[in-house]
Image (tube, grey):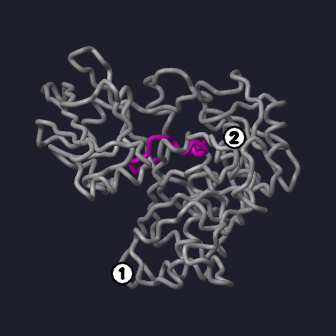
Amino acid sequence: MDTKHIRIADFNYDLPEDKIAEHPNPQRDHSKLLLYRKGEVSEDIFYNITSYLPKGALMVFNNTRVIQARMHFRKETGALIEVFLMEPAAPSDYERIFQTTGHCSWLCMVGNLKKWKEGSLTRNFEIKGQQFTLKATMLRGDELSAEQKKMTDHTGGTNYWVNFDWDAKQINFSDILEQVGELPIPPYLNRSTEESDKTDYQTVYSKVNGSVAAPTAGLHFTDRVLENIDKMGIVRDEVTLHVGAGTFKPVKTEEIEGHEMHSEYIVVHRHTFERLLEHQCQCIAVGTTSVRTLESLYYMGVYLQTHPDASEEDLHVNQWDPYDNGRDGGLAEGITPEQSVRNILAYLDRNGLDVLSSSTALFIAPGYTYKFVKLLITNFHQPESTLLLLVSAFLHGDWKKVYKYALGHDFKFLSYGDACLLIP
């Protein structure tokens, strides 16, 4: 299959507004569960999902946590400016930037940009009865250093460098977001963020701040379901992929070759690689973000086969690596998933690391061969989306059977909708 020449129109379907869940099921694990097993489709309730999972398997979750990334500032003229945090710039490390005090910088999307031509924006806020001021200053053009320009350029010109300063050295940026930020629920919900979203739009196992969108397949899990998974001897592991706003970016080109995938930051611990080996490099992925993280690891390990001294930045997976046979013009023949994982473990050993941190823009579409993921838990995705292409690749093109059933049996779609368990 010539993946790059896939027509996105072939992945369209009619999604009525009343099929989109505006709010989640009041009880997370009472969502409907569609089951696709070897071409057969049926349904159940999510809390019964363990009945369909293989005992002793490895199950991988994305433990990212959604941040209150949307901030609003009002100019003296009355114009409302939205500053949407996309990725940390200085410091560029997610963990460190939330702990900074006094100053930090982010790459941001800016709403109503034409009204913010110069100067700084300010907003007052209160913490523990004390008043403070947050100032946002956007750098443009010749105000950017060469390194800053490089960082903004890699976003395709959609993000801007914004410096944040505040007059409370004892208050970190995480505290400020709690007061000033707003949780960014998906735009297709066509409603404002509500207080309930602060809980509803986080998985029960979220830990690591950084996403601007939730890994929504995980929203169905409850402590009860996780306990049942443990009772079955299923090994739970976690990776981190910080979901960017690009997850909602529609494919606007006729053929997918013209679509530019967003890059996302991933973190994987040594124990995850060891557990993959223990499970013959086969696992259950919870959500498409876990899929993209896990499948990206294969190409990182392959690159290390011929570039053992690569930096973590060098290990970035480009969107067409699986289809162009890698950055070297050809993936090393015969590299198994097991060998790829061993290459990464050897890399961690050589560099005294317990964690691999890199990034991925991997584009999974029909024609892709999955390396690690054998079962997938996911929600129902938008028409003509990259996530629907990922599902189609997993089901060897049989996605229409799943979506036809869901539309005809009162399933709810998108972020707050129902779930499906896919077993090709």
Q: In the depicted view, which residue is nearer to us: 410 or 7? A: 7
User: Where, by quadrant of the figure, is residue 385 drawn?
Assistant: top right
- Location of the C terminus by quadrant is bottom right
Task: Give the side of residue 175 with respect to residue 301, left or right.
Answer: left
Quarter of the image with the N terminus is: bottom right
Q: Residue at x 60, y 36 (%)?
A: 415
Residue 107 lies, with reference to residue 192, above or below; the image says: below
Left or right: 168 as drawn, with respect to 286: left
**Pointer 1 and pointer 2: residues touching (CB < 8 Å)?**
no
Q: Which residue carries the number 2 mark?
A: 384
* Residue position for label 1: 351
Residue drawn 56% across the image and 41% down it: 249
Q: Nearer the viewer, residue 73 or 43?
A: 73
244 drawn magenta: no
Direction from residue 417 to residue 70 in the image, left or right: left
Q: Nearer the viewer, mark 1 or mark 2?
A: 2
Q: Which amino acid type is marked by label 2?
A: Glu
Is residue 203 visible in this depiction of the protein?
Answer: no
Quarter residue 402 falls in = top right
Q: Residue at x 68, y 42 (%)?
A: 47
- Tell me which segment is drawn in magenta: 206-224
Q: What amino acid is found at the position of numbered circle 1 in the picture?
A: Asn
Q: Reading the chain from its start, which is encountered first: label 1 or label 2?
A: 1
The disc label shown at residue 162, or none: none
- State the separation of the CA atoms marked 1 and 2: 42 Å
